[in-house]
Image: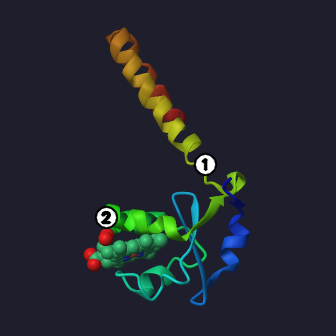
Amino acid sequence: MSKEITLATVKEHNKSNDLWIIIENKVYDVTKFLNEHPGGEDSLLSVAGRDGTKDFIDVGHSQDARNMMKKYYIGDLAASDIKKKVPLNTGLATSSDTEHNTENTGPSNASVVPKQCCILH
Ligand code: HEM
């Protein structure tokens, strides 16, 4: 049902009379909302044709704001353009998981494994 839109396409819509933004991997056409945005035009223009997720969340938008977004939703960011932050985090999680595991298995391993991890990384 939902349309997939590539990042390259979103980037083309970066002007005040043609303004798309990405929030949480969903694409919104906020052209008509620009004049009405309580946070002003500039904030929306600052993420024109880009991912505004961080800025959107940092503001702490209300549930009302989230409900309004549905009106401007035009599709999902293409799966191939979704930033895969997971592998990076997984890397970190793996070393801390190891620490947790060693905590459970006993102090003898705990003193060896985390040190190896730190040297290798
Ligand atoms: C479709 C997307 C968006 C919608 C529907 C929306 C809607 C709203 C609404 C209803 C408010 C009033 C306060 C509230 O109810 O939370 C607001 C405030 C605000 N918004 Fe947005 N917003 C959107 C995207 C963004 C983005 C991407 C940014 C930043 C780049 C942004 C920055 C702000 C700021 C700075 C305020 C003012 C907060 C304050 O006065 O304390 N908004 N927005």
Instruction: Identify the amino acid type marked 2.
Output: Ser
Q: Is 14 above or below relative to 85? A: below
Residue located 41% across and 17% down the image: 101
Frontmost residue, 74 versus 27:
74
Q: Name the residue under label 2.
A: 62
Is residue 121 visible in this depiction of the protein? no
Q: How many marks?
A: 2
Q: Ligand 1: give its quadrant.
A: bottom left
Q: Does the residue labelled 2 lie within 8 Å of ligand 1?
A: yes
Image-quadrant location for residue 58: bottom left
Image-quadrant location for residue 106: top left
Instruction: Identify the amino acid type marked 1.
Output: Lys
Q: Distance between the residues labelled 1 and 2?
A: 27 Å
Tell me if 4 is positioned left or right of 55 in this view.
right
Is residue 47 visible in this depiction of the protein? yes
Frontmost residue, 114 versus 58:
58
Tell me if 3 is positioned left or right of 73 in this view.
right
Tell me if 85 is positioned left or right of 93 in this view.
right
Percent x, y of residue 27: 59, 65
Q: Mark 1 points at which residue?
A: 84
Q: State the SS at label 2.
A: loop
